[in-house]
Amino acid sequence: MIKENFIKLYEDSFKENWELPALTDYSKNKTYTFKDVATDIAKIHIIFNECQIRRGDKIALVGKDCAHWCVVYMAAVTYGAIIVPILQDFSANDIHHIINHSGSVFLFVSDKIWDSLEEDKIDNLRGVFSLSDYRCLHQRDGESIQKLMLALDEKMEAKYPKGFQKEDIQYAELGNEKVVLLNYTSGTTGFSKGVMLTGNNLAGNVTYARTLDVIFRGERMLCFLPLAHAYSCAFNFLVPMAFGAHVYILGKVPSPKILLKAFEEIKPNLIITVPLILEKIYKKMILPQLNKRTLKLALNIPLLDARIYTKIRKSLVDAMGGRFREVIVGGAAMNQEVTDFLYKIKFPFTIGYGMTECGPLISYDSNKEFIPGSCGQVLKGIMQVRIDSKNPYHQVGEIQVKGENVMTGYYKNDEATRNVFTKDGWLKTGDLGTIDENNRIYIRGRSKTMILGASGQNIYPEEIESKLNNLPFVMESVVVEKNGKLVGLVYPDYEAVDNTGLSHDDISVVMEQNRVELNKLLAPYETVSTLQLYPTEFEKTPKKSIKRYLYTNY
């Protein structure tokens, strides 16, 4: 059991960092200090107390990332309730289902999403509150929440006549073994399950992060990944909030143009991202430079190549604010060519590995220890790993883990819980890979996406896609099996096609040439029979992994 109590981490942090900035809504240029956050939490606690919310009651939360989202999350867990964050990308039907399945009694929601929900499908909710200003949007018959909200300021004043002070902070006494979070997954396989995470699971992630020396009190971060996802929630919110760091919440779709402007203004000290962001920057900013004939020639000359790589690294670091110690990449596999290039130019990045069921971290290396192809060493003293194969160092098998960060199970789903744990208590990740003598993990693919070749060979479509995505005019791809053959579905890079003056009719010719080039890079049993053009971008999860299950029968 982790020694530090999860709730106590934040009780202490609010007191120690009282006057420091905690959260900024970047798009609104509005900043909240730790004092402001703690005061808002105190108000919400009065609402919970007056409405007789009990320990273990569920509080659902869905809406655009913002400071108020963070306040509600923190208010629920520090009161002793269980927070149920819901990804705003979920459909109205999914949101209805999660609210009902979790048994949530209150819902905090953005006004826009509330307009899309149907009250009669979530009629067990006692109250619904707006994320914009906490007003009561709806109350169940017989409730008097709206009347309470009118008197909230008076009640706050009566309870804290001298104003809310840091000495007034006193949060729930709750053991780390208690469930504090129900996180409904949004995976590539299409099924959403409620992951039960305890204070110990989350404290394991937060206290481990403290040992890494990548973010410190008073420093800055930019949050542009969805906070309802375990990866972003842990490292863009829970960690900095415990350390006294200042989080700017982008609150917009993170297009490269918007992101680069925000990086320039905020100059973050640590960057948490997903592969897609770095892959886009590589493809749009770096690859065109590398493909220039003069640069290609220069890179073949000793001494010149080092200078060129230094210059490219500097331009990339400057574009991302210039002050970060490290870029941590997670949430999905990163393209190997991009990984190798960033490593070659000594860009300070690393790739970690985790899953919602571990809240989320399983393995990590600092950028100084990172080895391309790996996703870090299993967290020492916190997690253990084993590979379900006869030779875990060389023979691919399922990655299985156990330790402080592992969930207690899936909410109201005993069958799924039984299926995801081995008989001797190890969590089956569903990922395939190997480890080395330092417990460093190397992932090959997902067990559910692995394709069995005609002669029994294991084929990992992610590895083929990684090579295919680097070929001309390929924006993204999915490799599927069709009638015993491998087929690549390709969404073309139409912007690149237009810029070169090609007609859209020429794309099929280019793709056939791409197929020939691709197969030269593959083993005979991995060869792709055809590349089919796909008309739109592939549908993705919030962490930007393609929802593969939608395309297996295309």
Image: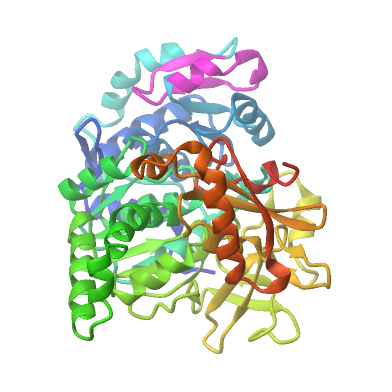
Q: Position of residue 494 (x, y in %)?
A: 44, 40
Q: Position of residue 240 (x, y in %)?
A: 31, 55
- Residue 527 lies, with reference to residue 188, above or below; the image says below
The count of marks equals 0
Identify the image quadrant of residue 56: top right
- Residue 495 lies, with reference to residue 2, above or below; the image says above
Q: Position of residue 352 (x, y in %)?
A: 46, 67
First to last magenta residue range? 112-139
Whether residue 507 appears in this view of the structure is yes
Q: Which residue occupies 71% across, 87% down?
A: 391
**Is residue 29 inside the magenta stretch?**
no
Identify the image quadrant of residue 309: bottom left
Identify the image quadrant of residue 132: top left
Q: Is residue 91 left or right of residue 79?
A: right
Q: Which residue occupies 77% across, 73% down?
A: 457
Q: Nearer the viewer, residue 314 or 352?
A: 314
- Residue 136 lies, with reference to residue 398, above or below; the image says above
Whether residue 176 appears in this view of the structure is no
Q: Nearer the viewer, residue 457 or 30?
A: 457
Q: Is residue 546 left or right of residue 261?
A: right
